[in-house]
């Protein structure tokens, strides 16, 4: 409910797009078979995103940049969970069947995907909560349904110093912001449109975008670090070291 409230506050009337697309995508996942749910959801969600970005061509008002970000996060989550459902079924469900097949018949069988250790089959309510979870809804980062589910059913965050991790993450932000302000002050973007810039040497004009890109990277880094701190402060994605964790995938054993 907090996620939906955030969408409504940020997007206003345009909130109908991320909410409607997520609900329709979830319905497609539950209605379609597990073998094809990822394909159907993929084409529908990205087709809706295409319609959303070209709404003015259909006589509808364009949405704000913030709503664009929310819509893209919603698309990633709905499509991502559909691929997780299908991938876990292929890796675990089909894998159990293949164990009974003799070696001569199983030569062409696809090897098990180690990214999936169990069947992922969330209910409609679980998919609803995952799609609109407030963590990462406005700026990311994207995280898989399995990470979201583990956050509630395997709450390792109770045994982690979330505050310490968050403070350690936030210490980088002042550095990024200071570098961004310094680079933007020395090499401003507006200068590239001036006549004085055009009169500079070819080498100077060729290297100037490098300075602009360096400043832009600091801005991106600061935003990503702040978004990451939301995850660390809540404990989302916390796993014990013994799980042999992989970035973006969680435990592998």
Image (cartoon, helix red, strand yellow):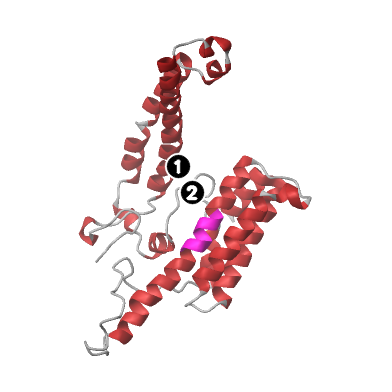
Q: Quick one: SS at disc 1?
A: helix
Q: Is residue 243 above or below residue 35?
A: above
Q: Mark 2 near mark 1, Cβ–Cβ under 8 Å?
A: yes
Q: Would residue 101 appear left or right of 72 to someone viewing this image?
A: left
For the residues labelled 2 and 1, the Cα–Cα distance comes to: 7 Å
On whether residue 180 falls in the magenta region, the answer is no
Q: Residue at x 40, y 41 (%)?
A: 229
In the depicted view, which residue is nearer to us: 35 or 224?
A: 35
Q: Would residue 249 appear left or right of 123 to someone viewing this image?
A: left
Q: Tell me the residue that label 2 is attached to.
A: 136
For residue 207, the mark is none
| Direction right: furthest residue | 59
Can see residue 119?
Answer: no
Q: Tell me the residue that label 1 is attached to.
A: 227
- Dividing the picture into quadrants, the one containing residue 115 is bottom left
In the depicted view, which residue is nearer to us: 89 or 172?
A: 89
| Direction front: furthest residue | 202
Can see residue 43?
Answer: yes
On whether residue 78 falls in the magenta region, the answer is yes
Q: Is residue 27 above or below residue 177?
A: below
Q: Is residue 21 above or below residue 69?
A: below
Q: Position of residue 249 (x, y in %)?
A: 34, 59
Q: Which region of the structure is painted magenta?
A: 74-80
For the N terminus, the quadrant is: bottom right
């Amino acid at each position: 409910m907090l996620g939906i409230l955030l969408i409504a506050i940020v997007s206003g009337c345009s909130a109908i797009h991320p909410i409607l697309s997520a609900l329709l995508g979830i319905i497609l996942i539950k209605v379609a078979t597990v073998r094809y749910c990822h394909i159907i959801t993929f084409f529908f969600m990205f087709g809706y995103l295409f319609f959303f970005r070209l709404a003015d061509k259909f006589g509808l008002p364009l949405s704000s940049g913030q709503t664009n970000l929310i819509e893209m996060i919603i698309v990633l989550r709905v499509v991502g969970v559909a691929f997780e459902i299908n991938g876990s079924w292929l890796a675990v469900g089909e894998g159990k069947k293949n164990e009974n097949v003799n070696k001569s018949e199983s030569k062409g069988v696809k090897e098990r995907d180690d990214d999936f250790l169990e069947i992922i089959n969330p209910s409609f309510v679980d998919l609803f909560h995952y799609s609109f979870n407030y963590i990462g809804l406005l700026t990311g980062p994207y995280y898989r349904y399995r990470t979201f589910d583990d956050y509630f059913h395997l709450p390792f965050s109770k045994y982690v110093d979330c505050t310490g991790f968050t403070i350690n993450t936030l210490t980088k932000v002042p550095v990024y912001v200071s570098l961004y302000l310094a680079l933007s002050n020395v090499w401003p973007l507006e200068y590239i449109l001036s006549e004085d810039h055009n009169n500079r040497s070819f080498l100077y004009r060729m290297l100037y975008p490098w300075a602009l890109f360096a400043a832009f990277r600091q801005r991106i880094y600061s935003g990503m670090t702040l978004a990451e701190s939301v995850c660390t402060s809540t404990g989302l994605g916390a796993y014990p070291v013994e799980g042999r964790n992989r970035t973006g995938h969680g435990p592998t054993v």
